[in-house]
Amino acid sequence: MRSAPTIPPTMCPPSLNAIPPNIEGNLGATLDEATFIITGYLTANVIVIPLTPWFAERFGRRQYLTASIFGFTGMSMLCGLAPNIETLIFFRILQGFFGGGLIATTQSALRDLFPPEQANVGQAIFGVVISIGPIVGPLFGGIIVDQSSWPWIFYVNLLPGLVSGFVALTMLKSPGEPKKMRLDLSGVALLAVGIGGLQFMLDEGERKDWFSSGTILAAAVCAALGLLVFVVHSLRTERPVVDLRALADRSVWSGCLLAAGFGTTLIGLNFIFPQYLQEAIAFTPTLSGQFMLFRGLPVVMLAPAIGAVLGANKLDPRLLIAFGFAATGIGTGWLGFLTTSGSEFGLLVWPLMIAGVGTAFLIIPLLTVVISSVTSEMAPKASAFVTLSIQLGGSISSALVVTILDQRQRFHSTILAGSVTPRNFPAAQAMSPAGLSGIVQAQASVLAYADITYLIALVSIVLVPFVFIVRRPPKGRPLSAETG
């Protein structure tokens, strides 16, 4: 039977795991207050992402991207200098507002920065960065904290922030002049209530025992009502702050579905597998972070080849995406099969790299194909929706992983406890009740980890046929927004 060290019945959500060590003690923060360091940032981030097309059009893309970069960098410095937890949370929320404008706007800028025949190069670069970030970020963050102190997690953003901001300011060109546009304040408020409530519910739900908490119940009501009224308002407004009509395009809504699935598989596995490595195989946090680099390695190695195939546009790029989901499912399912307390390092490397191959074939073609399947006017909106979908997919995945892991551990504990008898398990006669209970809980934990990996694999496989809902860009022409 499988075995692993016992884990607590209720695990901390991923947002708690991301809180830098010693930050609570250094700033005199409670656990609830420290949680908002992450929750506040993510909530502000997802609120701004769908607003980025409006900001870029109103103020100019170069100006907006430059302001976002410098604002994010400045808030990073202020976070590191924060004298107390309240100040830190405030600056983290502001950092989230600036950070929300980076990904989608950068992708749109890359699309126009490269000539049409090299559009795949820009998307390949973007795909590598967005895929590698969630993998190497926690590793380097852990090293920084181990070698220094938590403020340096924020200070390290200073140099790259200043350099990239200067480059954007001096070298980037806006596709058009800023336009005077009325801000749909009602739409912004409804979006903030709806998306903010949803993100808060996902981040805090498991720790507060979901709907048994009045706070989570209130957040769920705000999310449901806010989003419902926001949709009705946006469809009836002539110039809404977020143009939901773009979702009527089949490439956009299907691309959002696939992007949410990609976020689910990327963040879900990145969260659950290091937990397994540390709990079942006794890896240190740093070693488990280093091990996860094997998932990012194929992305870096395959990016040039994938970019070349996309650039030629002779092969249906949707086949690459389908292969990516299939490879992710196979690799993740294989990891579930090998999830034991006695798994060797070498055995786990290969399935993790196969999952990494799937990641490479997902992020680069997915972003390129969706943007290339729509008109130039719709491209920034599609980019924002796809980016938001990846973010929400990751948030939903993280929340569900924690909840399902807890439930499956309890399920397996009940089954195994009823099966452990002197006849089926002779060693039980020589063990104390506490020792026997520990073995049962350990085995149940590993089985629960395996169940999660199987579930993530199933999500990947199920999404394969949905890939072909996205329109195929015109064959033989370089992929860019103008091909739509």
Image (cartoon, rainbow, N blue to C red):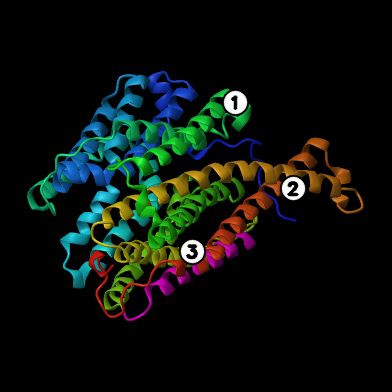
For marks 1 and 3, the one nearer the N-term is 1
285 left or right of 370?
right
Q: Quick check: 130 left or right of 455?
A: left
**Residue occupied by mark 2:** 412
N-term mark: 2 or 1: 1
Cα gap from disc 3 to disc 2, whole angstroms: 27 Å
Task: Give the residue at mark 1.
Answer: 213
Asked if one can make out residue 175 in the rendered structure from this viewpoint, the answer is yes
Badge 2 element: helix
Q: Nearer the viewer, residue 435 or 186?
A: 186
Magenta segment boundaries in residue numbering:
314-338
Q: Nearer the viewer, mark 1 or mark 3?
A: 1
Q: Is residue 16 visible?
A: no
Distance Cα–Cα, label 2 vs label 1:
26 Å
According to the picture, the residue beneath numbered tag 3 turns out to be 355
Across and down, in percent, residue 318 comes to 41, 71
Query: Marks 1 and 3, Cα distance to the nearest angstrom?
Result: 37 Å
Characterize the local packing of mark 3: few (<14), some (14-19) or many (20 or more) Cα atoms within 10 angstroms: many
Residue 89 position within the rendered picture, expressed as x and y whole percent measured from the top left: 36, 26
Q: Secondary structure at mark 3?
A: helix
Kind of residue at disc 3: Ala
| Residue 476: image location, x then y, percent | 28, 80
